[in-house]
Amino acid sequence: MTSTKVGLALLGLGRIGQVHLKIILSSERTNLLWVMEENTKIAEMVMKKHKMLGKIRVASSDQFDDILLDPSVQGIFICTPTDTHTILVRKALAARKAVFCEKPLSEELADIEACYNDAEKYAGMLFCAFNRHFDFGIRSMYEKARSGGLGKIYMVKTTFRDTPLWMGDPSLSQTFLSHDVDLLCWFAGALPDTVVVQATANIKEVAGKCDVDTVGILMRFPCGMLGILDFCKYSPYGYDVRLEVSGSEGMEITNAKPVSLVKTYTQSGQSTGQIYASFPDRFLQAYTSEQEHFLDVIQGKAELEVTRVFPERAAKVIDAVKESYKTGQVITLKK
Ligand SMILES: NC(=O)c1ccc[n+]([C@@H]2O[C@H](COP(=O)([O-])OP(=O)(O)OC[C@H]3O[C@@H](n4cnc5c(N)ncnc54)[C@H](O)[C@@H]3O)[C@@H](O)[C@H]2O)c1
């Protein structure tokens, strides 16, 4: 009997890698054959935690070719740091594996284009994990907005205030901005005509690294929609992701997700508990749904939804954001 389970390898067992690992291990559609992790202590600790020691092959980062030579591996999840993505993606595509790569594919547009050129050359599949497309709430807002349910769309505002403070990448980078920039372009269905940014450093530690932490980006799209992106590198009250869409017929909002739905009413007012502390809890449903989508595409049950236009568009806008910050000018994007 042939197995209908999809044979997988997972590279990188850090913050997001462990989120994907947990979902893969709980899925009945997958057969995780390999993990690859640079830090062997982390690999052992994670495999022990999931009672998988000896059941899944553990590779060090110089053993990628062994994984690529395994014909049972159909799909590869890349959850390593961004600067390793391009080489891993291109090698995996050349070995005819389907690729799920965490966002961003690279900080450089040219690398992203090279990855997709390879995907076309080898007729392979490259899925850039823009998980917000698969969040039930955000997706329903997108469908309503795009089907005219809110009339003509005037404005879309995204808020992303991160926690804990992650100093590994600058704020004006694909790592921090690509989810929200992609979201605004997705809602508008286009690249913006113009982009302008204002940014400051309010957090001492961030200023000490010559970075900014508080960022406002304004985009004007060809359809007349304005996109506003409010980003902060550190939020003291939890992982704050919000979205507001307003148009000629109404408005929709999704707020930061509370851990509990309990609302307390007293003489001094109303209150709810804390919002989620970080992305693994806030977006668990979206991570699960995007994995299902990846498996569906591998098994020929769905067409890839996040095609090359999405990460390439985000990269172009973020390059313009950097230029706007450097020059203080409104940047007009080349079509
Ligand atoms: N979609 C999302 O919501 C989301 C959330 C967090 C991170 N990310 C993205 O995921 C990627 C990883 O981020 P993270 O926060 O999990 O990083 P991390 O530093 O927590 O984990 C990366 C892991 O990869 C390992 N590693 C490094 N080089 C390797 C190699 N060549 N081979 C195998 N293992 C290697 C490291 O030892 C580490 O355990 C980044 O590109 C980031 O932008 C996406």
Image (cartoon, rainbow, N blue to C red):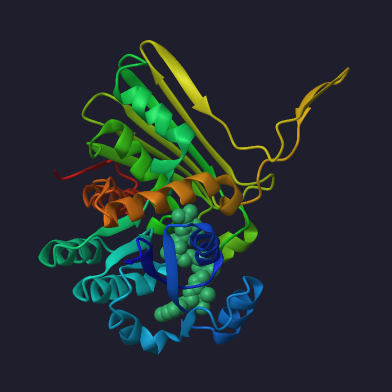
Q: Is residue 41 above or below residue 217?
A: below
The outermost residue toward the front is 1
Residue 333 is situated, as x and y percent measured from the top left of the image, at 20, 44
Percent from the top left, x then y, of residue 124?
A: 19, 63
Say above or below: 147 vs 201: above
Residue sitting farthest toward the bottom: 62
Picture quarter containing residue 192? top left
Quadrant location, the C terminus: top left
What residue is drawn where x is 31% and y is 37%? 186
Q: Nearer the viewer, residue 197 or 145?
A: 145
Residue at 34% x, 28% y is: 226
Q: For this view, does 65 lie left or right of residue 95?
A: right
Outermost residue toward the right?
Answer: 267
Q: Is residue 162 left or right of residue 77?
A: right
Judging depth in this view, the residue of 120 and 268 nearest the camera is 120
Q: Is residue 294 left or right of residue 167?
A: left
The image quarter in which residue 182 lies: top left
Residue 78, image x, y percentages: 39, 68
Residue 169 visible in the current orientation: no
* Res 239 visible: yes
Q: Residue furthest left?
A: 121
Q: Is residue 290 above or below residue 73?
A: above
Residue drawn at the location 86% of the way across and 20% of the way down? 268
Q: How many marks?
A: 0
Is 137 on the left-hand or right-hand side of 3? right
Asked if 146 appears above or below 24 in the picture, the reply is: above
